[in-house]
Image: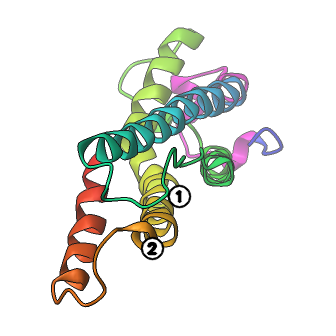
Amino acid sequence: MSHYNKSQYPEGTFEICPKFIDFNNKSCRDLSNRYSKHNTHRSKCITRCCNETMNELQNLNPKLLNNAIHIIFEEQIEILSSSIREMDYQINKTSTVQAHKCKTKIKTYQQFSKKANNRQDQNSWKVSGEYFFTPYIQSFIQFIKQRIIPMLNINNNDNNMEQIKREFIKLSGIIF
């Protein structure tokens, strides 16, 4: 938002926060880094959790999976990158703080940053849900369907085979 002039901000913005443009620009960078670090950590945790689930499944019943010595669900870098790009877009599209709605003056960057972090905490779920968690869940379910279900050691003549496969896919989603 650094290319905008003061007249493009809501009335009262600069009375509440005289350094609004500088604070907002710095806050955009800080919030982007914060989201990136947070979701990078989430991505690693989800991947680890998926793989621990697969290991537990294999340990519980080694005969359940044919030829599945060590199946690995890999970290979904493209999903992580896409969610970070979308969050950057959302951060830069609007002001990180709606200063004109504040009741007290914002004099320091620390005050501004606290409000910006709070606003991001209240709104980041919109991006995280659609661009991070949903694609990760879909990716893991696809992984289960493509890599695990074909290896299930279930007699094809078993009438319950489709039900077992559906339950397996549902249960694999519990890790999220």
Point 41% across, 55% down: residue: 129
Q: Residue 100: x percent and y percent? A: 48, 37
Relative to 10, say whether 37 is above or below: above
In percent of width and height, residue 113 lies at 53, 19
Residue at 72 percent across and 30 percent down: it is 25
Is the residue marked by circle 2 packed among few (<14), some (14-19), or many (20+) residues within 10 Å?
A: few
Residue 155 x/y as whole percent: 28, 80
Q: Amino acid at mark 1?
A: Tyr
Seen at 59% across and 30% down, the residue is 31
Could you tell me which residue is drawn at 40 percent across and 70 percent down? Answer: 149
Q: Quadrant of residue 169?
A: bottom left
Please name which of the two marks, 2 or 1, marks the residue nearer to the observer.
2
The magenta stretch spans which residues?
Answer: 6-23
Point out residue 77 in the picture as x, y percentages from the top left corner. 67, 47
Q: Which residue is mark 1?
A: 131
Up/down of 155 relative to 65, above or below: below
- Ranked by sequence position, the earlier of labels 2 and 1 is 1
Disc 1 crowd rating (10 Å Cα; few below 14, some 14-19, many 20+) is many
* 146 sits to left or right of 29: left
Question: Which residue is disc 2 drawn over?
Answer: 150
| Residues at marks 2 and 1, CA–CA distance in whole angstroms | 28 Å
Of helix, strand and loop, which one carries label 2? helix
Query: Eyeballing the image, is 69 above or below 44?
Result: below
